[in-house]
Image (cartoon, grey):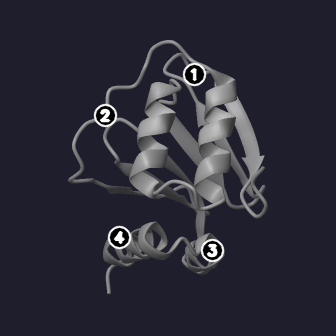
């Protein structure tokens, strides 16, 4: 199976069953260093340990990202999603309303960084135990 097809399958699995730790394990086993998720489009850019990249396009409808940011709303959206209160799609909508343009998951640091359109970090959390 081609890498892009495997990544697409992994992403769909984590969206449906929320087993993020298995998702991270699969990414690491395929030499993914980090990935960037673009909230407005749902597109994902995976970067390997050799700095090659694979882009995955989404079929999701476009979300309008609020130009006004609120770090508190970002933290709340993350907490709600990772405790099972909201679905993945609700999480993305809440992040867009909070002004999140993209998030970056760094597999070596085990962090998720939420970024605004003006390239400001709004919130950083541990991906193993988000708070």
Q: Which numbered disc flags the more N-terminal residue, 1 or 3?
A: 3
Residue at 60 percent across and 70 percent down: it is 20
Give the farthest residue toward the top: 68
Whether the residues at callouts 3 and 4 have beta carbons within 8 Å, the answer is: no
Q: Position of residue 102 (x, y in %)?
A: 50, 37
Residue in front for this viewpoint, 128 or 80: 80
Residue at 52 percent across and 30 percent down: it is 100
Mark drawn on residue 28:
3
Q: CA distance from mark 2 to mark 4?
A: 20 Å
Instruction: Tell me the element at label 2.
Output: loop
What residue is disc 2 on? 63
Q: Which numbered disc flags the more N-terminal residue, 4 or 1?
A: 4
Q: Position of residue 21 (x, y in %)?
A: 66, 74
Whether the residues at callouts 2 and 3 have beta carbons within 8 Å, the answer is: no
Q: CA distance from mark 1 to mark 2?
A: 18 Å
Q: Is residue 120 left or right of residue 16?
A: right
């Amino acid at each position: 199976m081609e890498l892009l097809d495997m990544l697409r399958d992994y992403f769909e699995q984590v969206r449906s069953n929320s087993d993020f730790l298995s998702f991270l394990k699969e990414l690491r086993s395929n030499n993914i260093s980090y990935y960037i998720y673009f909230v407005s489009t749902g597109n994902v850019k995976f970067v390997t340990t050799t700095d090659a990249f694979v882009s995955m396009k989404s079929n999701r409808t476009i979300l309008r990202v609020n130009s006004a940011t609120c770090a508190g709303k970002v933290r709340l959206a993350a907490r709600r999603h990772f405790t099972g209160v909201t679905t993945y799609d609700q999480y993305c909508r809440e992040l867009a309303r909070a002004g999140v343009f993209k998030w970056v998951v760094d597999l070596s640091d085990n962090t998720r960084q939420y970024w605004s359109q003006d390239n400001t970090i709004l919130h950083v959390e541990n991906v193993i135990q988000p708070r």
